Amino acid sequence: MFTGSLCYATGAGSNPVSLALGDVDHDRWLDVIAANEGPDQIAILKNMGGAPGAWSGLDSATTYGVGVSPYFLIAPDVNGDGFCDVVTTNYGVTYVSLFINDRQGGLGAPATVTVDSRADHAAAAYLNDDARLDLAVPCWRATEVVVLLNNTLPPVSHDWNGDDIPDECNFLPYPPSGVTDARANHPPTDVVPCRGIGEPGDEITICLYPAQAGMCGEFVLCETCSDPNCGPNSIEDCSDVGAGCYELTLAHGIAATVESGVGKACITTIQYLPTGAYVAYWKHPANVDGSSRANLQDISQLINRINIVFEGGTVPLWEADINNSGAINLADLTELINLLNGTGAYDPWFNTSKPVLTGCPDPCGGGGLLAGEGTSGPGGDGGGQPGGEAEGNGSDGEGGGSAESDGNGNGGAEGEDGDGGTNGAPADESGAGEFVMWFADFLSTTSFPGPFTLAEFTAAVEDLTGFCAAHLSPADRAELLCLLQDPQRMYASEQVEALIPNVLAALEE
């Protein structure tokens, strides 16, 4: 059942006595967290990930002082920000230690929570059904357990997508703010597309803190562009499900539209009027990893997610169910390639940029607008921010464009010309370099039996090879040919090795 063993150091004299698994750096790979009794520390060994069958292992340990000897630890998301935190029970003291995730790949300084007795274990669960994880701690050599009810509010501001715009202020949405929906908007001629984003039922759930009832009429929707088939979106239904939580059903899926025959990504926001807090969802078909643009890396990311599903794991449908079938499988790979290519009725999404939020509510501003062409309320300022500098590339770049207002407020100022940049190698915005390495490794490490049948794998390789022949630059194709013909490269499967001549022939055409 298990083959071989791998050992990773936790530090000299560390004496690890327990461990937990948690995604500390939010990269979808579970990291290892160890309680080091010897030096009164916890150690985090980050998971380096890797291609299927070619795991890169764990990084070297990063340690955090506890102050006393830790005995047991767990990794729950205590403050509801989507990042796992760490709770330790400790030898000989009547408190547990709480490390809050700094959302930068590490942990903050520990805080102590008194439990009135020595504790040797802990568990986290939603004990009182208020969407906040509580703690239960058994008292050592006593006759009781201690329950610590969590009264922590969600952070004042989330920045899920790293764009320095706080995505929410006083409520916790699911799907979380900043999610990018990579699915095909719907078959382009279908006028009954996927409703909303997420599952089950593609409803959006928003929980208010503190909990308030009867607020269904206080949510409003804004979108940066409308669906060309279904028209402007709206909140079709709202259900108050208790404990301050609301389920919202949209009239149709969040929009992605067409501009001059090319796919244009869009953003939909839902704002809670009493405070101005809002949730933002990016609709960017083919952008599986939610990065700045749809590119070749999304193909490798999709196959990684398909592998997770084939191995019994769970992946959100908005990340990988590209064809909106309700299941994640290799049919989504074909659909992703069709989207990137602009095959048939689809718009071409290859190398399109993730959108910038313009013309919708300012985070927590209660009525202001971000830079762009939106409207503002009577007497208020419009989207009054400069359009921003354009990037230079050897000569002065063009201005960021003007921001207009069609409401009562003032429009944003016209963007200034960007400074000239230095001539040199352009940034690899297509992601081709990483994709070439991944594709070569994917071919050389796949074996049978495995997550794919040979027929499924062969079809996927044909799709990928055709895509490479169409979109890779001559230099990138040459690099891929070199990697695949390297005499040092070994293939894990004879069936895969038999496909390589066809791959080489297609790339050399």
Image: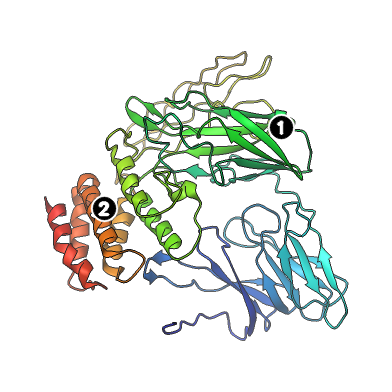
Numbered badge on residue 469: none
The crowding category of the residue bearing disc 2, from other C-alpha atoms within 10 Å (few below 14, some 14 to 19, many at least 20), is some
Side of 451 relative to 495 (left or right):
right
| Residue 413 drawn at (x, y percent) | 53, 21
Question: Upstream in the sequence, badge 1 or badge 2?
Answer: 1
Closest to the observer: 242 or 131? 242
- Residue at 26% in and 64% down: 454
Q: Is residue 368 above or below residue 247?
A: above
Q: Which residue is drawn at 12% across and 53% down?
A: 508
At 43% across and 28% down in the image, what residue appears?
Answer: 191
Residues tagged 1 and 2 counted as in contact (Cβ below 8 A) = no
Q: Residues within 10 Å of mark 1 (few under 14, many from 20)?
A: some
**On the image, which quarter does residue 216 sit in?**
top right
**Residue flagged by tag 1: what amino acid is it?**
Cys
Q: In which quarter of the image is the N terminus?
A: bottom left
Please state if 408 lies on the left or on the right of 486 as rendered.
Answer: right
Instruction: Residue 437: tell me if it is visible.
Output: yes
Q: Badge 1 is on which residue? A: 216
Q: Label 1, secondary structure: give it.
A: helix
> Which percent across, then down, holds residue 234?
58, 27
Badge 2 element: helix
Q: Is residue 95 left or right of residue 159?
A: right
Camera-side residue of 247 and 64: 247
Residue identified by numbered label 2: 464
Q: What residue type is labelled 2?
A: Leu
